[in-house]
Amino acid sequence: MSGQLTLHVPDPAERENLAAFLSHALRLDPAAVIRLRRRGDRFVSAWAATGFEALAVRTVVAELGIDDVTIGADTILAGLHGAGAGSGFGLGFAMDSAWHGALPPESGFVHVEDVPARMLVELAERGAEVAQEHGGKHGPPAALLDQTVLTVSGGGEQVEVPMRVVFALAAMDFIPHGGEKTDSRRISVDEIVRVRAARTWLRLDARYGSVARRRGPALPLLTH
């Protein structure tokens, strides 16, 4: 399948994992596109924009017929749910021009600190309440999104985590919980989210995926 626009996710559990990721991306943006990238010989990473100026990623055991391609999320989801999905399926047409911005590096991140997942979801819940009170038709105010809600230190780094990254993590449903919708009271007190940082990127790693955002002043993102 090398060189072809095909995806093979042989494990039903991994197909379900990827389908859940795609469903959350489509809930945030019905026209979402997904950037698929090979990671080594056995893995494929799926990247999505979240609408919070943060990227979301989930990595699954899969085979991609091309190194790097952008595809409509609905197209991939339909393939995963189609007959014979376990033996691989075509991805239709590439939409590479629809992807705007660079991806974070695969290496170079240091572990800063582990924080309780419940605390991050509580921050998202409180932020959502404030957004409802003060937000407009365009969503939460920028001042709320850009507010630093957590500062962590470790590994020689001090990292400020803005609300928009916490919102993105919660919106993608990357933290396990015991109900239909995320509720901080249902999250295990032992569940953690790992904060990592590179020179120009911040990343939060949760059980079901990661979110990443550029650190510091906003920079123009070049297509990578």
Image (cartoon, rainbow, N blue to C red):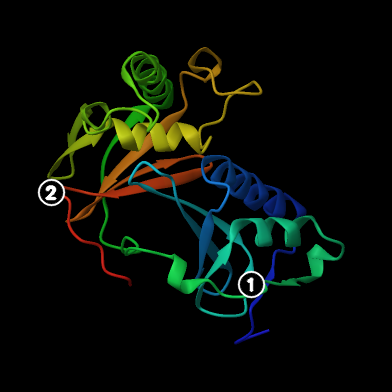
108 horizontally vs 9: left or right? left
Residue at image coords 29%, 48%: 213
- Residue type at mark 2 is Pro
- Distance from label 1 to label 2 (Cα)? 37 Å
Q: Which of 176 and 34 is in front in this view?
A: 34
Image position, residue 201 (x, y; %): 24, 52
Q: Can residue 153 be seen in this view?
A: yes
Nearer to me, 76 or 122: 76
The quarter of the rendered structure image containing the N terminus is bottom right
Which residue has dot 1 on it?
Answer: 63
Q: In which quarter of the image is the C terminus?
A: bottom left
The reply, left or right, for residue 38 in relation to residue 161 is: right
Instruction: Tell me which amino acid carries mark 1.
Output: Glu
Residue in view at x 19 percent, y 55 percent: 200
Which secondary structure lies at badge 1? strand
Classify mark 1: residues with Cα within 10 Å, few (<14), some (14-19) or many (20+).
many
- The mark found on residue 217 in the picture is 2
